[in-house]
Amino acid sequence: MSNPSLLILAGDGIGPEVMAQVQRIIGWYGDKRGLNFDVSEDLVGGAAYDAHGTPLHDDTMAKAQAVDAVLLGAVGGPKYDDLDFSVKPERGLLRLRKEMDLFANLRPAQCFDALSEFSSLKTELVSGLDIMIVRELTSGVYFGEPRGIFEEGNQRVGINTQRYTEAEIERGARAAFELAMKRDKRLCSMEKANVMESGILWREVVTEVSKDYPEVALSHMYADNGAMQLVRAPKQFDVIYTDNLFGDILSDCAAMLTGSLGMLPSASLGAPMENGRPKALYEPVHGSAPDITGQCKANPSACILSFAMALRYSFDQGAEADRLEAAVEKVLADGVRTADLMQANDGTPVSTTEMGDAILAALDASL
Ligand code: IPM
Ligand code: MG
């Protein structure tokens, strides 16, 4: 049987730096656990624009469709701010999500014990925090038509459309309920049913799907209240299911609660392929961080933890994912810190590579 295939799209900014550490982790799994992957690499975002004049070449899109999982670093940077909207680095990422039909975006917001003091909230509000946000990723206002900037009388009007079909709401809801079943069996669905018809439909469909998951306690919340509750008492949540735009905002909010944006991974999953594995793309939640690019300062943990999610959700290697997550936690508990995990006068931070060294050493020690 051939090895599972991975396409690495390191992208822009710190993407290549953090991905280099993921490559070492992948190598470790081959050497030490006999888990070999066929790894190929390609360009996305600004890097692809520089090479091809497009943020995602058709050949790269075809490769992404053919592999078992895509690992993405980050896209974007100030250099590309003035590009036409249609070729901005972010369009490359959005095209991958749309054409691979990655409808379920899993964004865990987990507070690492060793880092709880970094949260902007009081430690007791966040210690032990473990939320899973499931964001619908292929529809809603990100993709709805009509969209554009149009002339209307003597002025221009900018239009985007929030649009959800029942099927789109339902498939994401099923993914969220399945996750809730493996966790604390609580699901909170967030929309704006008080002002939006798409929210009314959202609530109806999620309620209907819940009949298939009687063990899961379902609640509904308006998304604005959800934002407030996330900063008031975040531990009330287990799984949150919400739409593309609310999910974008609420997941940034939840990420910041943990105090460790540089630590958070994500998975974007689609329908199962012929081999039974879901279409999948894994990426850190942090962006391209142009301010520290090229300085070997970036924290590779979020990207490494994204590979852990790949082990769990694409390759059925839950125990190996646990091993990798435990290795990262061990390194934090030992006080190893990249610059983003330090406060002023906290000593000397380790480099990106040294963080990779420490995680590899913790993996070795786990054998
Ligand atoms: C995210 C990002 C993207 C989004 C951008 C880069 C297109 O903010 O993944 O949350 O808005 O979805
Ligand atoms: Mg975002």
Image (spheres, helix red, strand yellow):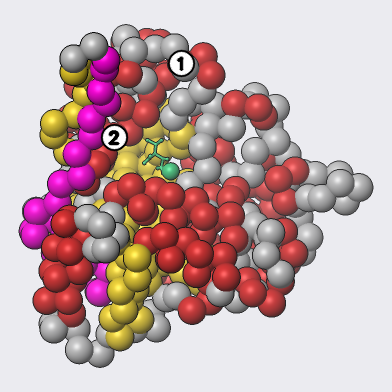
Q: Amino acid at mark 2?
A: Leu
Neighbours of disc 1 within 10 Å: few (<14), some (14-19), many (20+): some
Assign the C terminus to one quadrant of the image.
bottom right
Residue 98 seen anywhere in this rendered image of the structure:
no
Look at mark 2 in the image and give the residue it sits on. 94
The answer to whether the beta carbon of the residue marked 2 is less than 8 Å from any atom of ligand 1 is yes
Which mark, residue 80? 1
The image quadrant that residue 176 belongs to is: bottom left
Q: Is residue 27 above or below residue 317?
A: above
In this image, 25 relative to 364: left or right? left
The label on residue 327 is none
Query: Magenta span has 180?
Result: yes
340 relative to 269, above or below: above
The image quadrant where one finds ligand 1 is: top left
- The vertical placement of 268 against 229, above or below, is above
Question: Of helix, strand and loop, which one carries label 1?
Answer: helix
Asked whether 259 or 269 is in front, the reply is: 259
**Magenta residues, as a range?**
155-182
Quadrant of residue 231 within the rendered picture: bottom right
Give the residue type at disc 1: Tyr
The front one of 111 and 351 is 111
